[in-house]
Structures are given as structure tokens and as C-alpha cells.
Image (spheres, helix red, strand yellow):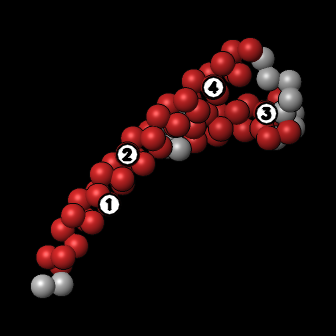
Amino acid sequence: MDASGWSDYCEERRRTAEEAGDEPLWLDHSSDDFSRSRSHEILEICRRIEKEQEDEDTAMLIRLVKIRNHLWA
């Protein structure tokens, strides 16, 4: 979440809502188009990072399976 910018975005939204006396971020249904667009962009970055990590995990697990017989020799 930090690498994508989501954590900073949520903190910024929380702080802005507190200063304005509004509801917390998760109860705010009045987001403007810019905020909605920005959150979608950040979440897309987050999804891309998670996909890259999943692909890396899969590649490493495949390597592990290939060498497993040599680990306990």
C-alpha cells in the first residue's frame, strides 16, 4: 500500500475530512470526480504491484520445486 501511494492518499483524505469536520474517509460518499479518479489510479498501481509480486512468487516457487530433490540430499 505504501509503494502505490494508497497509504498517503488515505491519510491525506482522513486529515482533510477531519479539518472540514466531515465523516471519516470510509463513510464519505460525496467524493468528487477528481478524488474518485485519483483513487482509481492509485488502486490500479496497487493491483499492478500485487500482480508483479504474485508473478515473482510463482517464479520462485517453480524454482523451488525444480531444486527440491537437492535440498535434502
Write down the quadrant of residue 20 in the picture: top right
Write down the quadrant of residue 25 in the picture: top right
Are discs 1 and 4 less than 8 Å apart at CB?
no
N-terminal of the pair, mark 1 or mark 4, is 4
Write down the quadrant of residue 19 in the picture: top right
Q: Judging from the image, what secondary structure is the residue with disc 1 in?
A: helix
Residue at numbered disc 1: 61
* Farthest bottom residue in view: 73
Are discs 1 and 3 less than 8 Å apart at CB?
no
Q: What is the spatial separation of the Cα atoms under label 1 and label 4, in whole angstroms?
A: 31 Å
Residue at numbered disc 2: 55
Q: Closer to the camera: disc 3 or disc 4?
A: 4
Residue at numbered disc 3: 17
- The residue located at (64%, 40%) in the rendering is 11
Q: What is the spatial separation of the Cα atoms under label 3 and label 4, in whole angstroms?
A: 19 Å
- The residue located at (84%, 33%) in the rendering is 28
Of residues 21 and 63, the one nearer the viewer is: 63
N-terminal of the pair, mark 1 or mark 2, is 2
Mark 1 belongs to which amino acid?
Answer: Leu
Q: Quadrant of the C terminus?
A: bottom left
Question: Do we see residue 25 in this rendering?
Answer: yes
Residue at numbered disc 4: 40
Q: What is the spatial separation of the Cα atoms under label 1 and label 2, in whole angstroms?
A: 10 Å
